[in-house]
Image (cartoon, grey):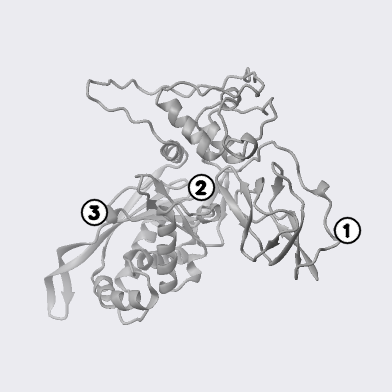
Amino acid sequence: MASVELLMPKMGESIMEATVLTWLKNEGDTIEQDESILEVATDKVDTEVPSTHEGVLTQILAQDGDVVPVGAPIAIITTNGEDAPNTSAPSKETVSTTTTQPVVAEATATITTTLEKPASGRFYSPLVMNIAREEAIDMAELERVPGTGKEGRVTKKDILAYISTRANGNGAVVAPSTQAPVVASPATPTPAPKPQPVSVSAGDEIIEMDRMRKMIASRMIDSKRISPHVTSFVESDMTGIVNWRNRVKKEFEAREGEKMTFTPIIMEAVVKAIKDFPMVNVSVDGDNIIKKRNINIGLAVALPSGNLIVPVVHNADQYNLAGLAKKVNDLARRARENKLTPGDLDGGTYTISNVGSFGNVMGTPIIMQPQVGIMALGAIIKKPAVVETAEGDMIAIRHKMFLSHSYDHRVVDGALGGKMVRRVADYLENFDVNQSV
């Protein structure tokens, strides 16, 4: 017989705590390893927590609504199906029971309204509260949103449905009569600068931005305000890589069940260049430059909705080419299926964006804060080019691609930014076409 503590798992670098939404298992239930046993929420996502061991859920330490720090015990599991003495469990007093919202350190977050503690005592998950802030819904309005969750709680689905109703002008949702009225905070937030008025003509269609589009817009504005952007361009000869990929892609897919795209090949070259020029793998903190030890490459993925999300390949320098191909495909697939976890989105130190997938030959991407560099990969196009041979210069048909490197001119000067993108092109042009994968 052995007793083990189930700990609140890490769910991203910037997430220090999570709120218990509901337990899917009861004390005394038999549980399997990796079986989901409770739901938790952060200000970014609601997710299920799997069991780390097989056994019996002996004691639940964190109740619904508790805000628990990452790494703190939330339950006791007894292996081999036997109960553990209660004295082996930590006191419930070690678990925070406050319902105030966690503070998440994220430079690009935009909070448009301040939410007070609900006078009715109604519980709201951090994700619901974060959506309310983004949509400028104050507590008085939030209290009027009917909930379909446990004990009438407002779920993500509930608040998004309310926002849709609100945006379509169908009026406010009537609050249940059992809820106490809430007085809105007298504090008035500083109004944002008003944009120039836009004329609307007959026949024009007005489309309400969804929440993700609003967040993207806010973060892009913040990035342009924070970082003075400079972009350098280099054209790379991809002929050797194109021919190599055409030769190995069918065999690789048959063996690994994954496609070999150009993205992992280029990502490998970017990682090598970052090792050569580590000062592009940094962040700015006031007057300090934080040089990152890990190389975590963000990958911009277009979603079916048209929005953009950037999952991260952590420790990209630890993968070989086959490993990068599998990781890139997995992240892109789960991004499009809305199955990414918070950890998949955190910790990026440099980003690449494949604008060539849309047929674009080059682009000037906006930096993902707090990073200082991003590279756009253009379409690979056949074109005539001068080729040096032993017999002299000749015109040949070559596969060419533009690389666009946007960087933060506060800390990355033109020489460094230009050398970095040139080095990526050099690695691509000197790709070992005799290697196997």
Question: Where's residue 349, x and y in %?
Answer: 50, 55
Residue at the right extreme of this rendering: 87
Label 3: how many Cα within 10 Å (few below 14, some 14–19, many 20+): few
**SS of the residue at dot 1?**
helix
Q: Decide: is 202 above or below 107.
A: above
Sequence-first tag of 3 and 1: 1
Sequence-first tag of 2 and 3: 3
For the point 63% across and 17% down, the residue is: 186
Give the residue pinned by disc 1. Answer: 87
Confirm whether residue 110 shows in the render: no
Question: Where's residue 120, x and y in %?
Answer: 68, 26
Side of 184 relative to 1 (left or right): left
**SS of the residue at dot 3?**
loop
Q: Nearer the viewer, residue 259 or 107?
A: 259
CA separation in Å, label 1 and label 2: 46 Å
Identify residue type, mark 1. Thr
Question: Where's residue 180, x and y in %?
Answer: 67, 21
Give the residue pinned by disc 3. Answer: 359
Side of 365 relative to 311 (left or right): left
Callout in the foreground (3, 1): 1
Quadrant (top left/top right/bottom left/bottom right) for the C terminus: bottom left
Give the residue pinned by disc 2. Answer: 370
Q: Do the residues labelled 3 and 1 touch (CB within 8 Å)?
A: no
Label 1: how many Cα within 10 Å (few below 14, some 14–19, many 20+): few
Identify residue type, mark 2. Pro
Q: Residue 78: which quarter of the image?
A: bottom right
Quadrant (top left/top right/bottom left/bottom right) for the N terminus: bottom right
For the point 39% across and 60% down, the residue is: 420
Q: Which mark is residue 191?
A: none
